[in-house]
Amino acid sequence: MGRKTWFSIPASNRPLKNRINIVLSRELKTAPEGAHYLASDFTSALSLLDSPELEKQVDQVWIIGGSALYKEVMESPGSKRLFVTRVLKQFDCDTFLPDINMDKYKLLPEFPAVPTGLQEENGVQYKFEVYDSVDN
């Protein structure tokens, strides 16, 4: 996760439980308190996972923001799966998921354990979408 995403999580919920928390930042010199590791970019973060200390502990990598990190990962080589929650309401906000390049990703009609169709919570409608990268 990016630095701003890390600090957007309430301190009482950091680090995220049952996972290795890697914070990406070009500004920080040491990992923020509670984070397990600090990396300057996505490639460096992946390199950490190849270390003897971590290689046997990690079977999946999840990216949870922010938008610059999403963009970097979505444009990087390799197979990926995007889990997107499409919120069907306008909000005053300044951060967005980059556009999904449909030449590089395909929308799956369904995915195990991911609800299909329109969902609603507290009067806000949304739907879940899962995309797989396409080999070009």
Image (cartoon, rainbow, N blue to C red):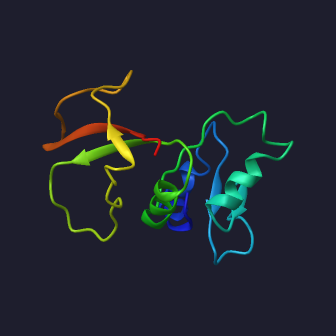
Write the residue at 31% across / 59% down. 99
Left or right: residue 50 versus residue 41 is: right
- In percent of width and height, residue 113 lies at 38, 22
Residue 34 shows in this picture = no
Write the residue at 34% across / 67% down. 95
Q: Report the label total.
A: 0
**In this view, which residue lies farthest toward the bottom?**
27
- In percent of width and height, residue 68 lies at 47, 67
Task: From the viewer's side, name the closer residue of 55 and 2.
Answer: 55
**In this view, which residue lies farthest toward the top?**
112
Left or right: residue 66 versus residue 122 is: right
Task: From the viewer's side, name the closer residue of 114 and 104.
Answer: 104
Task: From the viewer's side, name the closer residue of 44 and 66.
Answer: 44
The correct choice, above or below, for 16 with respect to 4 in the image is: above
Write the residue at 47% across / 41% down. 135
- In percent of width and height, residue 88 lies at 16, 49
- In percent of width and height, residue 103 lies at 34, 50
Quarter holding residue 132: top left
Left or right: residue 16 versus residue 133 is: right
Quarter holding residue 76: bottom right
Residue 131 shows in this picture = yes
Left or right: residue 128 versus residue 7 is: left
The correct choice, above or below, for 27 with respect to 134 in the image is: below
Quadrant of the frame with the N terminus: bottom right
**In this view, which residue lies farthest toward the front?**
136
